[in-house]
Amino acid sequence: MNETKIEYKQLGDNTIVNITHSLFSAQISLFGAQLLSFTPKGKQDILWCSSDAILDGSKAIRGGAPICWPWFGPSADGLSPQHGYARISKWKVVNSDVQDDQVTVMFAPEIEASLNSELSLNIEMVFSSSATITLITENNSATTHFITQAIHTYFNIQDINKVHVPELSNIDYIDKTKNGVIKNDPQLIVQQEVDRVYQYDKKSLTIDAEGYYIDIKGDYHDSVVIWNPWHEKAKAMADFNNDGYKQMLCVEMANTTPVKVAPNQKIKIQQTFK
Ligand code: BG6
């Protein structure tokens, strides 16, 4: 018999939704609608969260699966927050559905139209032995908009030295650490700061950590961003525990080329992992 529990826990000014189900446990922060932890039954947490992460709602949480929306990276005006404002806004649960084999939770901004008056974002999370995050953007205006976006997931790995992502071998990438030069490597190995936008729109990826695997699937993305700050940049970030870079790799399903959202159109981006 399934004994699912959905509980709300207060952490400073932040509310965390805790879900326990026979197939998994999950924790979602309502600040950012950010999945922080996802542990399928019998496995370790698939997500990495910095032990120095700031959880009081004053800053985007360093870990889990932050939502970058309605832009990825620096803002066009250079004044608005990096990666948009979804990850630094408050969200609410608008619907949840508990089944024996999965739990679905829908999130909307706590204050409707607080993110953008002409575009709305709703976030669906479906949990079973895998977790799926879907961002659904709708254009409620008569004007065409363009957005970039990403599901910026921090994966929990034992040892960065053992990790590679075979599907990204020989795929062109923009190297953000080298002023955006286009490169191509026979194998993705992380032995220094890595900040890359891979031109990869296929659905499947694997984090292969010599015997430990994370299966990742994406949909509606045009690229996959791979990020690890390595030790100097990690040290420079107050919310990134100094040795944390050894245990994480961000693999982000992204639309880095602006996507058109016509009046009344809905667009999606999705990431699944297990
Ligand atoms: C990645 C970017 O997606 O996010 C990097 O490609 C950036 O350039 C990283 O440094 C972390 O961003 P932030 O704003 O969470 O520190």
Image (cartoon, rainbow, N blue to C red):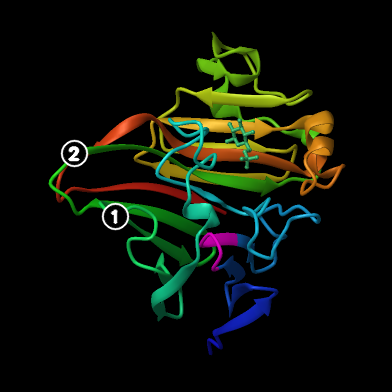
Total labels: the figure holds 2
Classify 247 as above or below 36.
above
Magenta stretch, main secondary structure, is loop
Residue under the point 59% across and 82% down: 8
Q: Is residue 73 above or below residue 213?
A: above
> What residue would you read off at disc 2?
144
* Relative side of 64 to 54, left or right: left
Amino acid type, mark 2: Thr
Gap between marks 2 and 1, in whole Å?
13 Å
Tell me if residue 264 is in the magenta stretch.
no
Mark 1 lies on a secondary structure that is loop
Residue plotted at (50% across, 67% down): 128
User: What residue lies at 72% left-to-right and 60% top-to-bottom?
Assistant: 44
Of labels 2 and 1, the one closer to you: 1
The percent coordinates of residue 10 (x first, y second) are 66, 79
Q: Position of residue 81 (x, y in %)?
A: 53, 42
Residue 211 lies in quadrant: top right
Tag on residue 117? 1
Neighbour tally class for label 1: few under 14, some 14-19, many 20 plus, Cα within 10 Å: few
Q: Position of residue 87 (x, y in %)?
A: 53, 53
Is label 2's Cβ within 8 Å of ligand 1? no
Ligand 1 within 8 Å of disc 1? The answer is no
Q: Magenta segment, which residues? A: 30-35
**Front one among 86 and 184:** 86
Residue 139 in sight: yes
Vertical order, 108 against 193 (above or below):
below
Direction right: furthest residue: 243
| Residue sitting nearer the eye, 273 or 74 | 74
Circle 1: residue type: Ser
